[in-house]
Image: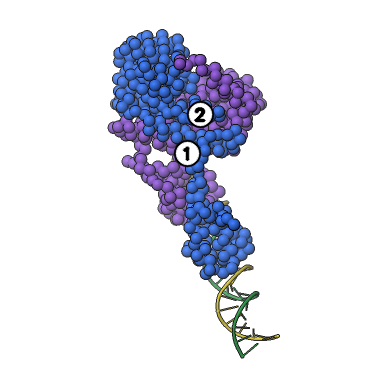
Chain colours: A purple, B blue, C yellow, D green
Amino acid sequence: MTQNVKEIFGNSLAAKVRTLAPSMTRSMQRVAEAVAKDPAGCAALTVTGLAELTGTSEATVVRTARILGYPGYRDLRLALAGLAAQQASGRAPAITTDIAVDDPIADVVTKLAYDEQQTLADTAAGLDTVQLAAAVSALAGARRTDVYGIGASGLVAQDLTQKLLRIGLMAHAHSDPHLAVTNAVQLRAGDVAIAITHSGSTGDVIEPLRVAFEHGATTVAITGRPDGPVTQYADHVLTTSTARESELRPAAMSSRTSQLLVVDCLFVGVAQQTYDTAGPALAASYEALAHRHRR
Amino acid sequence: MTQNVKEIFGNSLAAKVRTLAPSMTRSMQRVAEAVAKDPAGCAALTVTGLAELTGTSEATVVRTARILGYPGYRDLRLALAGLAAQQASGRAPAITTDIAVDDPIADVVTKLAYDEQQTLADTAAGLDTVQLAAAVSALAGARRTDVYGIGASGLVAQDLTQKLLRIGLMAHAHSDPHLAVTNAVQLRAGDVAIAITHSGSTGDVIEPLRVAFEHGATTVAITGRPDGPVTQYADHVLTTSTARESELRPAAMSSRTSQLLVVDCLFVGVAQQTYDTAGPALAASYEALAHRHRR
DNA sequence: CACCGAGCCGAAAATATCTTTCATATGTGA
DNA sequence: TCACATATGAAAGATATTTTCGGCTCGGTG
């Protein structure tokens, strides 16, 4: 069936719930779900009330609040009240985003566009700017940068690499796990290694990051699972948002959108910091391409 | 003597405070004033905190909350949080999307996200669904599909290819112009060739499309310039939106977003039409990847 | 000028709410 | 199946909120 209207509305909490759901236990998920579905209603409840509503205990409610990033239930409740107020003032968009097999193509376009917009909003809301800034600084000062990504994430890795090269940085994208590890051995302090993996548990990508990490390079993970294995070798973790996925809309689609936004942010951040060299470099590369275009 | 900025923004609380002020005692007024001036700040305080801030006692704070129409301070606080959230969101829409060299990283994130959302909306609005449907049909029935793209568009080409392969279609991405042409010669009626180029005038991409076109393949152009050279060899033209570009935000960024949306639409469209085979194929590829993830 | 009373005020007790602890239950892999 | 790890809730403990209650100020009055 269709999802709850309230969730459709840019509710970054819902996104957070999706991202963190995997690291929650069953009862916690029940609580998180209730909260995501009806922020206003839950804001009116005390810990005890919410515990009863979800058939769990106060302790579980508090634990859930912690997972969601609040110091305790009290703060979650305040945030909920805020969210509720925002929702109440905002108009509810009428689109259901699930794509059906028999949807006319025009609907597909609308839904996909809407969905990706949503993903962008969620990602932007959930991105830790402190981590981002740290990653940017590392990149800007790096002697060399290696980027690991496989499959769909591999394209994102290449995208980042292309951009960094354009502003004069030494960057390589690796999609061959063996070569990636071989190269990772060369990295040392001052270099940067970036792993891109939605699941956070792609061995082929974690391995080179681990090697880079152990050789003293600054490591960055771009992942949808901030608690996944990949993060244990990452100095900085950039979280991408996890969108609902359905049969016709594989996770790869929105995770890619999300990853690309993060990558763009990295790029622009680095370009800002190295503007003296990045500016001219960008202009030069643009110039160099001009003659490849037919007039 | 100007009024506090925050108060100007439709803050019904401030009005209530003014109305009820006469019926309040001196210390209550101090509390009410503090609350009206900085809802967000006060929402972060406990009764004790607010009492101290206003130099009064907890009891007075509670009394004030009652006067303002809430059952107690707890509820006033929730209302305050809601108010703060509304105010915060109300200020948001006026973002200038140009990114300056000295923008803090948080702004970069917001602006990029906003910008890409804009691009998506534009693309969706400008996409010709008739052309799209035609392209989808051609793809769904194709014996073989070749996709041409160079540079950033090359990644999009690969993305499309990866997706099509997943649902069991024969697809190849070419970024080497020579190989692309060499392969294009093999195409014939019933095959599909897709050229992706933002400028619409990338010779290296136009050439293979021309060859494919002349060999009778169904040709599709995904371009930001529906009047560009590439379209003369295209049976179907899918237009991507062209966003303003600035120094720090090269066109590649938004054109990529736009192209990816188009590509996703193609993919979903094809998946719908070939659902009988696409559905199982998607499930199978998902399954096959599972063991590549560490637990 | 001393006294009285009405209402304001805050300290502290009482209560509600939130958080932590810990023992039990539940599931999971060898 | 057992041993281990993890999840869970009951209840104790800590905080925050509400209520109570007595002191206090201030204006009026004898």
| Disc 1: CA contacts within 10 A as few (<14), some (14-19) or many (>=20) | many
Toward the front, the furthest residue is: B1
- The structure residue drawn at horizontal position 45% and vertical position 51%, both measured from the top left corner, is A85
Identify the image quadrant of the N terminus of chain B: bottom right
Q: Amino acid at mark 2?
A: Glu
- The structure residue drawn at horizontal position 41% and vertical position 15%, both measured from the top left corner, is B206
Q: Position of residue A208 (x, y in %)?
A: 56, 24
Helix or strand or loop: what does disc 1 sit on?
A: helix
Of A10 and A67, nearer the camera is A10
Residue A182 sits in quarter? top right
Q: Which mark is residue A269?
A: none
Helix or strand or loop: what does disc 2 sit on?
A: loop
Label 1 in the same subunit as label 2: no
Q: Is B164 on the left or on the right of A128, as rendered?
A: left
Q: Is residue B173 visible?
A: no
Give the Cα separation between the discs numbered 1 and 2: 24 Å
Q: Which mark is residue B245?
A: 2
Q: Position of residue A180 (x, y in %)?
A: 55, 20
Chain letter of the residue beneath label 2 in the structure image: B
Q: Amino acid at mark 1?
A: Asp
Q: Position of residue B132 (x, y in %)?
A: 33, 26
Up/down of B123 relative to A55, above or below:
above
